[in-house]
Every structure is written in structure tokens, then in C-alpha cells.
């Protein structure tokens, strides 16, 4: 326990002692131990698989114990899983103690609430809807205890300030635990039915399948994020003057998309588009990207190829969707004077018009090798001046409204001496944009 702060060690020890008290009095001798033993073994097996394959806890069996057993017996169900499951990170002892104590206390509280509201009596009766109220109260108690203990540990370990230790935890626990609680209630009802424990175990099959699908979805999202991070890091390494620019353009694109009322899926695609809009710079010679002086016409033509390079690079990444069009067309202008194809008006894809405004805004509010950062108000005025010629007025208006509500905190990405140049010429309108 040497690697754990003293306050955290004391906190874990206190929670462990409190959970040990919850095991008292032990279930009476006449209590059948078959149900607690079976549930404990099943919970240990499910928890082991869940942590290895899905990366999270598995509460349906634990909550079924809260609905079926006395509080002390329900608390015992959580202990074998902590003793038997492997611990990935050191120190192992406090982590193992915490894994046993936290769910034991939570399930004890859930069983107490369920029992106090007559839940076990309604479970044995014929009216199934009557079981929902005590079961729901038990699930809420389970979530509250998990939230209280988890926040306390975060504060004791010094991970977050005390005032923020519990922020957002209840919302994070409530939805998944409610689903687990429903599955646990179905298990308990079938357990008490004429079909017995074997039928109750069948509830776990669809639960495991749905969780596997959910885990696959998150793994796929993580792979997408890793792909995007790798591309952005490559661009940042190549063009050090604009490091962080891609992420900020993604954030500004999200502001515009949300202001326009787009659904969450399109907002996510616009975030990808903003982050990857300059990925084509990987195909541009580094000496041009880092050149301090003005660009020659030939150098400008080379840089103007970066949208096509970027589109070709991401052509086969299917999850990007319309973001690929934004990468290709984010330097088009509303009056048709942009590049690479000179599209105008509504012929420019909507996503590209959004990214164009976000790109120009961040370029003007960030220091580059060729220009100093401009105040947000000055950048907004420049965007409004060019609305209708360079930029879509609807996108500019959406960004302005979003900025009034949330503000903007531009990051300085370089401290090189500024070179005089027209702001929009450099930021979004010509091949000199870097």
C-alpha cells in the first residue's frame, strides 16, 4: 500500500471496516446457503469475464441478490469476486479490498431499502408491477452508495478538489445500473417462480449479448479516435507552427453545427472534418509549410493541392462520411474564387462551408509564423465582412451566436515575428493559407 496516499489508505480501510459491519449479523443457521453461494459464484464468474472482455463491472447478479436475500447475505455475494479476480495495477491489496468493500456496502444498502419497502414480500406475491417500486428504490440506493464512496475516494486520493469529487458521478452510474437492476429483477422473479434458478440464469444470456455489442461499439469508436489522433499528430509534427489548430477547428465546427441544430451524428462527423481538414499537408513539402517569407506563385499552387491530398488520404475511411467532402472543399469560396475546384454557393457542401468558417476563425485568433493572433472581436468582424463572398453568412451567424454564449479561448501556437499580410488572404482565402 506504499504507492497509495495515506488519506486514501485510511479511507479504504474505513470503508472495509464499515462493510465488515454490514455482514453482521451473519445469516441465521436456518437460512439456506445455496442461493448466496450460487449467486456469489455466478457473480465472481461474470465479474471476471466482464472486467477482462468489457472493461467494467457486472451488477445484475449482485442486484438479484439484493432482491432475493437478507442484507447481510446479499453483501457476502460481492466478496468472492474481489478475492478471486486478478488485479491489473499495483498495489493489489488496497484495490482488492476496495473491490470487495464498495459493492458489498452498496448491495447491503439496496437490500435494506428493498426489504424495508416490503420488496421480498411483493416478489413472492402474484402482482409483478408491485415489485417495481421497491426494486427501483433499491437500485437508486445502490447508485447513491456507489457515488458517495467513489467520490470520497477521489477526494481522499487527491485526484480532484473536494468540491468537484462527486460531480457527474451519479449520472454516470444511474443509467447503466438501472439497466442492470432491471435484469437483476427479472432474475429474482424467475428465481422465485416455479421454474427456479435455472430459468433465472437465462436472463444473463441476452444481457451478455447486448453488453458484448455495446463493448464492440466502444472498441470501434476507440479505433476511430486512435486513427484520427495518429493523423493529426503527424500533421502537427510536420507543421509545428499550427500545432493544436486542428483540434480547435474541430471544436469551432462543433459549435457551429450545434447552433444550426444538427443531430449528434452529424455533429460528430463535423468534429472529424474540422480535426482532419488539413491532413493533406502531409503531402506538402515541410519547407513550404514552415517558410517565414511570402510564398511564390509556384509554392502557392503546391500548397493549394493539400485539400486533394487530404481527400485521397481519407478516401477509404468509411466512418468519416461527409467529412471527406469537407476536407476536399474547405477552401472553396462562396463567390467561386476558392480552390481546388472553384465551386460557388450551394454547390459547396454544407460541411465544407462550416469548416471553412471554423478554420478561418481559428487561423485569425492564433499566432502563426506569418501573422499575430487577432482579438476574437476583430476576427468576428472580419468574418462578417467577408460573409456572402468568402463565407456562408448562415455559418458565420451561427458561430457568432455560439461565441456570445460560450466564448472562445484561442491558444497561441507560435511566437515567431509577424509578417504583414491581409488576414483573410492568409487565414482562409488563398494558397498562402497554411
Image (cartoon, rainbow, N blue to C red):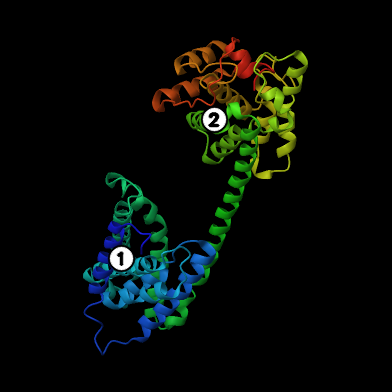
User: As drawn, is 134 to the left or to the right of 196?
Assistant: left
Q: Earlier in the sequence, mark 1 or mark 2?
A: 1
Asked whether the viewer can see residue 203, the reply is no
Crowd rating for badge 1 (residues with CA inside 10 Å; few <14, some 14–19, many 20+): many
- 10 Å crowding of disc 2: few (<14), some (14-19), many (20+): many
Q: Quadrant of the N terminus?
A: bottom left
The residue furthest right is 298
Between the C-alphas of marks 1 and 2, the distance is: 42 Å
Identity of the residue drawn at 57% across and 31% down: 243
Query: What is the x, y in percent for residue 269?
Result: 59, 38
Position of residue 285 in the picture relative to residue 14 (left or right): right
What label does residue 253 carry, if any? 2
Residue at 38% x, 71% y is: 62
Residue 126 point in image, percent of width and height: 32, 76
Residue nearest the observer in this picture, 346 or 215: 215
- The mark found on residue 106 in the picture is 1
Query: Which residue is located at x 30 percent, y 78 percent?
Result: 73
> In the rendered view, does 186 fall on the left or right side of 9?
right
Residue sitting at x 62%, y 42%: 228
Amino acid at each position: 500500500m506504499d504507492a497509495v496516499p495515506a488519506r486514501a489508505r485510511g479511507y479504504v480501510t474505513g470503508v472495509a471496516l464499515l462493510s465488515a459491519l454490514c455482514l453482521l449479523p451473519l445469516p441465521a443457521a436456518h437460512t439456506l446457503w445455496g442461493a448466496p453461494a450460487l449467486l456469489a459464484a455466478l457473480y465472481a464468474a461474470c465479474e471476471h469475464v466482464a472486467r477482462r472482455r468489457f472493461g467494467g463491472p457486472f451488477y445484475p447478479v449482485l442486484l438479484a441478490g439484493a432482491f432475493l436475500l437478507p442484507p447481510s447475505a446479499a453483501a457476502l455475494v460481492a466478496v468472492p469476486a474481489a478475492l478471486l479476480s486478478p488485479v491489473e495495477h499495483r498495489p493489489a491489496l488496497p484495490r482488492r479490498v476496495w473491490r470487495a468493500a464498495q459493492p458489498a456496502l452498496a448491495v447491503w444498502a439496496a437490500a435494506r431499502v428493498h426489504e424495508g419497502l416490503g420488496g421480498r414480500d411483493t416478489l413472492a406475491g402474484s402482482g409483478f408491477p408491485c415489485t417495481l417500486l421497491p426494486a427501483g428504490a433499491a437500485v437508486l440506493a445502490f447508485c447513491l452508495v456507489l457515488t458517495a464512496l467513489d467520490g470520497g475516494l477521489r477526494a481522499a486520493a487527491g485526484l480532484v478538489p473536494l468540491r468537484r469529487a462527486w460531480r457527474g458521478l451519479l449520472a454516470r452510474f444511474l443509467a447503466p445500473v438501472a439497466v442492470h437492476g432491471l435484469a437483476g429483477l427479472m432474475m429474482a422473479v424467475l428465481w422465485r417462480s416455479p421454474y427456479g434458478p435455472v430459468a433465472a440464469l437465462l436472463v444473463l444470456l441476452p444481457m451478455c449479448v447486448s453488453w458484448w455489442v455495446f463493448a464492440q461499439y466502444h472498441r470501434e469508436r476507440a479505433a476511430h479516435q486512435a486513427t484520427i489522433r495518429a493523423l493529426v499528430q503527424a500533421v502537427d509534427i510536420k507543421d509545428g507552427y499550427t500545432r493544436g489548430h486542428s483540434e480547435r477547428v474541430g471544436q469551432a465546427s462543433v459549435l457551429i453545427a450545434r447552433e444550426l441544430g444538427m443531430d449528434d451524428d452529424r455533429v460528430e462527423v463535423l468534429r472529424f472534418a474540422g480535426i482532419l481538414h488539413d491532413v493533406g499537408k502531409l503531402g506538402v513539402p515541410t519547407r513550404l509549410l514552415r517558410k517565414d517569407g511570402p510564398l511564390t506563385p509556384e509554392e502557392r499552387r503546391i500548397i493549394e493541392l493539400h485539400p486533394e491530398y487530404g481527400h485521397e488520404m481519407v478516401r477509404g475511411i468509411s466512418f468519416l462520411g461527409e467529412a471527406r467532402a469537407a476536407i476536399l472543399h474547405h477552401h472553396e469560396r462562396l463567390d467561386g474564387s476558392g480552390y481546388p475546384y472553384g465551386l460557388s454557393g450551394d454547390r459547396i457542401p454544407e460541411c465544407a462551408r462550416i469548416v471553412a468558417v471554423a478554420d478561418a476563425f481559428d487561423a485569425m485568433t492564433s499566432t502563426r509564423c506569418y501573422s499575430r493572433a487577432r482579438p476574437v472581436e476583430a476576427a468576428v468582424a472580419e468574418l462578417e465582412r467577408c460573409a456572402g463572398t468568402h463565407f456562408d453568412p448562415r455559418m458565420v451567424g451561427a458561430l457568432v451566436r455560439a461565441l456570445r454564449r460560450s466564448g472562445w479561448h484561442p491558444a497561441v501556437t507560435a511566437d515567431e515575428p509577424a509578417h504583414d499580410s491581409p488576414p483573410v488572404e492568409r487565414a482562409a482565402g488563398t494558397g498562402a493559407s497554411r
